[in-house]
Amino acid sequence: MIEKTLRTTHGKLKVRIPSRLDEVTLGQMMALQEAKDLGDLDAISILSDVKVSDLKSVTNAADFVQFADAVLSLSHQIKYLYNSDEVPKTITLLIDNKPVTVNVLRNLSVEPAGAFMAARDIIADEIADHIKIYGEENWQDYFNPSLGACSKVLGYYLYCRVTGNPYDEYAAAAFADHVKQLRVTEALPIAKHFFLSYPDLSRQRTGCWHRLQQLWKNVQASMRSKSLSISIQ
């Protein structure tokens, strides 16, 4: 973490932002990814939880240079994180202000059936949207799922495990907000596993490259299935 106390027009302001990805939450990284016309102060505000209006009251703009450098470094680090296969053994979420820890590595399957189908549809739509924009040729080389889609998939994966409640479609969808607590270094490798193992959403024994080559065929099959269901109705 980088922490500095800055002088403002009305006193002092303590600003503290992450310097490494393992200090950044998924929610913070999502906010950075989704922000439009993101400026230095906007990024610092998201990472420090300090209002932009308060940051603008800092008397010396040079005080932000170190923070801006840290933001730039984080943006480079996230590119490499998409290539990471280091799935955490456990993760911990705060539920009703109480920490709940669940095992991850030993059970990388989306269950029950309702969660499985919802997560599968999110992944299929994300891949299809990517191909609509960038084309089908060599799409696997450039595909990175949005963090928003990752949080939704993780919400379905974790809801029953963390809460101990029976599956509920709306509650599981809303659980994506809790997932934002996770460090992005925890969340993204888990989500990546499910995107690569689509449409099974469970541990695969085949090679990663073979799975990638099959992804678009699976998406096309899923889309045809959806269209058939609509026509039948």
Image (spheres, rainbow, N blue to C red):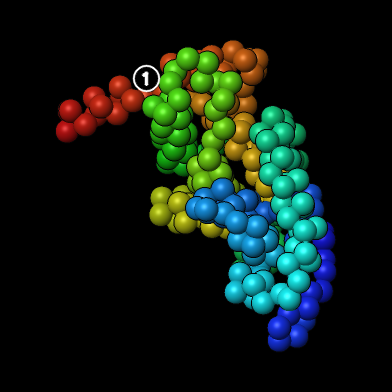
At 43% from the left edge and 21% from the top edge, which residue is drawn? 135
Q: Nearer the viewer, residue 198 or 68?
A: 68
Give the total of numbered labels.
1
The residue lying at 69 percent from left, 44 percent from top is 75
Label 1: how many residues lie within 10 Å, few (<14), some (14-19) or many (20+)?
few
Query: What residue would you read off at disc 1?
Result: 221
Q: Is residue 140 left or right of residue 126?
A: right
Name above or below for residue 188 compared with residue 159. Answer: above
Q: Position of residue 171 (x, y in %)?
A: 45, 56
Residue 209 shown left or right of residue 221 in the figure: right
Provide the secondary structure element on which disc 1 rests: helix
Q: Is residue 38 above or below residue 110?
A: below
Is residue 170 something one can see in this rendering? Answer: yes
Percent of width and height locating residue 45: 64, 64
In the image, is 172 to the left or to the right of 207? left
Where is residue 181 shown, x and y percent of the image? 64, 57
Seen at 62% across and 15% down, the residue is 209
Residue located 21% across and 31% down the image: 230
Position of the C terminus, as image quadrant, is: top left
Query: Can residue 186 be spotted in the picture?
Result: no
Quadrant of the drawing holding the N terminus: bottom right
Three-letter amino acid code at the position of disc 1: Ala
Q: Position of residue 133 (x, y in %)?
A: 42, 29
